[in-house]
Amino acid sequence: MTTIREGDLVLLRFNGRREYVVKVVRGRRFETDRGYIELDSLIGLTYGTTIRTNLGYKVLVLKPLPSDLIGFFERRTQIIYPKDLAFIVYLSGVSSGSIVVEAGTGSGVLTATLAYYVKPDGKVYTYEVRREFLEIARRNILRAKLADYVVFKNKDVGEGIDERNVDAVFFDLPNPWNYINIAYEALKPSAPLIIFLPTVSQVEKTLTAIYEHKGYTEPKVYEILLREYKSTPGELRPETWMIGHTGYIVFTRKIIK
Amino acid sequence: MTTIREGDLVLLRFNGRREYVVKVVRGRRFETDRGYIELDSLIGLTYGTTIRTNLGYKVLVLKPLPSDLIGFFERRTQIIYPKDLAFIVYLSGVSSGSIVVEAGTGSGVLTATLAYYVKPDGKVYTYEVRREFLEIARRNILRAKLADYVVFKNKDVGEGIDERNVDAVFFDLPNPWNYINIAYEALKPSAPLIIFLPTVSQVEKTLTAIYEHKGYTEPKVYEILLREYKSTPGELRPETWMIGHTGYIVFTRKIIK
Amino acid sequence: MTTIREGDLVLLRFNGRREYVVKVVRGRRFETDRGYIELDSLIGLTYGTTIRTNLGYKVLVLKPLPSDLIGFFERRTQIIYPKDLAFIVYLSGVSSGSIVVEAGTGSGVLTATLAYYVKPDGKVYTYEVRREFLEIARRNILRAKLADYVVFKNKDVGEGIDERNVDAVFFDLPNPWNYINIAYEALKPSAPLIIFLPTVSQVEKTLTAIYEHKGYTEPKVYEILLREYKSTPGELRPETWMIGHTGYIVFTRKIIK
Amino acid sequence: MTTIREGDLVLLRFNGRREYVVKVVRGRRFETDRGYIELDSLIGLTYGTTIRTNLGYKVLVLKPLPSDLIGFFERRTQIIYPKDLAFIVYLSGVSSGSIVVEAGTGSGVLTATLAYYVKPDGKVYTYEVRREFLEIARRNILRAKLADYVVFKNKDVGEGIDERNVDAVFFDLPNPWNYINIAYEALKPSAPLIIFLPTVSQVEKTLTAIYEHKGYTEPKVYEILLREYKSTPGELRPETWMIGHTGYIVFTRKIIK
């Protein structure tokens, strides 16, 4: 686990914050504008080692963490950010062995994160009506080596969720208020439904639908803000720019009507 | 999993946001100022059911999520809050099978959260020099049924970490800048060290120690803010009061010097 | 101006953050649970002096700033906080000589703040339909010695604003979307209309009314968050609790249709 | 006041948020990439009118508010932002007739804001050691028609403040901890000293100097965050990006030692 092997994903970090996630393939060369690295030369090295490109630039080789992996996902949609992924997963209680449903898949960032936590025995069923996004998500998740824990469904969640008694349902959709009962039918009693929404009027409509359904606990609405700091000692201060908004997180739980 | 069994922990939620985590013990009665519940009567019920106390008050019976469990931990120390637990765990990449070290244990809130994610094959080694806190944490974690994944050590982390090649180290200590090298010796190369700190001068000292050690990546400093919203449709607005500060999260990774 | 005179308002600050705004009246005694102060004894002292009560407790005597004064306003309504007052006044461009209209008066906190900035030649016309609030506001503003700059009107703003060509209009009302045209008739061309609102659905309705009226610039919506820090050197950190929400500020300007 | 006259400053706002502050000079033409405007043609128009360039583009003509004016200041230094200007001015109690001291002048943004509030009888004494910045600030303030209320001093504030008994002192300097006693000598008893600082270590040093001086009240430390919202009805949500940090505001008041 501490030695780089063929087929591993590695994080190559240059100075100046440039970094790449690369698969170690024998006989292949990774090219950058600061020179190239023969990927064969990485095999057998210890993670955390600093190497040099053929032009002499230093490159730190790290083992990618989940947040590194999703940073390199191909994306065509707005993705969910780490600050929100972290809180959504925590709230849901999803862990090793959980069986969960997600719609829509989008670029697969939440899918991959859930897959990472349900492994090795759980499963993520993910619904996406747009075939081209599902294919992007599938490639991303294959590359992240998480495909064993994901079932991809090219299906409109409005036509129903096939699974029953699932441990959590996640919606990242423009109109989740239409699918509150579909989530209800899929969820195990007491299990959470978590919905991610960018605008306040979407939140209002979703809350109304949850209250009217009567099969859920009083919903909670959360927003997570992340401040990053400039970390130079003696110059500690928040970064000048920050992400001011991504979306609201609505959380509720199925109850017996 | 959807039916309440003897020995289960259940979350009993009264109207008005009062709630309790209770272990279902045969022949025992749970008393509140709104009447009592015979715990026998819960056995065989489906989670998500609403029952009544002998005085007729409604009580919703839910299966506790991790965030519910830690809400009922006995605590003598300042605890880490869900917004920070979620981000710390996410950043660390800890998941099923991880082997991790934590110091100090405190009331065991981070310990329990890490245990929840490393199960069933991982392990959390937790160091606490104050015996009375270790005992509180042990009771909390036993009650949360996570004790199988935790090794408690009544030891000053300054005397060294016994484990080697661990997947992550977590410090929630007043003076972590003294233990930067101790973490280094325990960590697997490329693995993260995550430190939680309330004040800016602690952050400055920690950053200085990390830079001087030279065995770590450029540290990152994060702060998480959580806004909760009043969720009544038509009255959506952030809550009037919020937690303004808990602590700063310092993140770095071991590299080969 | 640096010597306390009869009739002055003074801020009496005890240790432990207790403080009072008191009018210096000859022959009167100010009583607290830490003893009393003969107000005669203050006359002729320099502001910034520390005195003692008859029981020996130290009391710092300061000249009240506007933020001190409104802290001692009698209030029956939710008030606007300093963080919002400051930004509202700044955005409005109100300064010495401005003629402005406000509705509703509430406890008079925004009224007093506007009066403070328009003095000595400007005027604040304030509308309040509830007579009892208007009387409270009048007493507060008299006590703050700002009554010369305020005209109180016990009138529903929905019946029209009497003034024309005013430099700014301020609404702190539950349903301002009904009064967008009334503000238009009162405002000088190019002058700002500023509206303070607690909930997002009020903001949505107000924005809709402004866009539909067509006599205003594209509205802006702002929210101000204030973090207070614990100021002990070596322990610098944000306060644990903060005000998470007061209201949204909507800003627009009259244009010629 | 509602009709545009020769010599007025006007705000010309094109669609798409482009805008300019321009002085109405007879016989001059204002050129943009969307065509030109003959400035003569503005004279006699009512503010708030929409005109067209020679190429037919619509331009709204507004009377600049203080926040518009400083947006067009020439700047060579980091400036103080409206959210901070507003709170600093409010805290200080500065209003018509106040006599205040500021160091350093920088680009003159705080200078202009203070001048706007002390007019017509107050005065701002501003110290700047770097002659080139003082000249920029002087040009900015002349253009904003606020020069009558400002005295510019090309002097290091470390050599002393010439004024005595002033109503407030403002420091926007890299090392204000060296000038705490200089402020003390200039301030009227009970009057505020307000300091703006980007980093936490500057705040710590400043707090230490204030406590050690013993001539000031317990300092307060504030930080202001501004969230701007996308104001389209039905799509209300905070803007994706926000200013995450500008600086900390330290507030204290002179007391008699």
Image: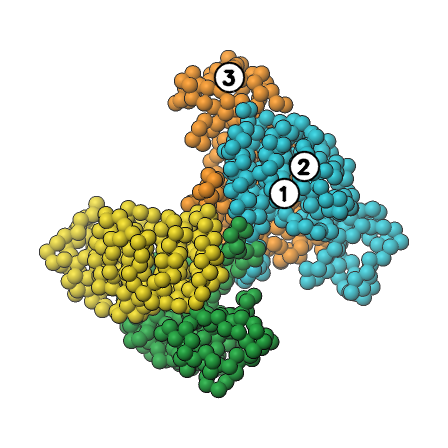
Chain colours: A orange, B cyan, C green, D yellow
* Residue at 46% across, 19% down: A52
> x, y percentage for residue C98?
30, 71
On screen, D66 above or below C63?
above
* Residue at 44% across, 19% down: A53
Q: Which of marks 3 and 2 is in front?
A: 2
Q: Which of B105 and C218 is in front in this view?
A: B105
The numbered disc on residue A39 is: 3
> x, y percentage for residue C219?
37, 59
Real-space Cα distance between discs 1 and 2?
10 Å
- Disc 1: host chain: B
Establish whether labels 3 and 2 are both on one chain. Answer: no
On screen, D87 above or below A17?
below
Q: What residue would you read off at disc 2?
A: B157
Q: How many dots with numbers?
A: 3
Q: What residue would you read off at disc 1?
A: B173
Is any atom of residue A229 visible in this view? yes
- Disc 3: host chain: A
Locate residue D72 relative to residue D26 in the image: left or right.
right
Label 3 secondary element: helix
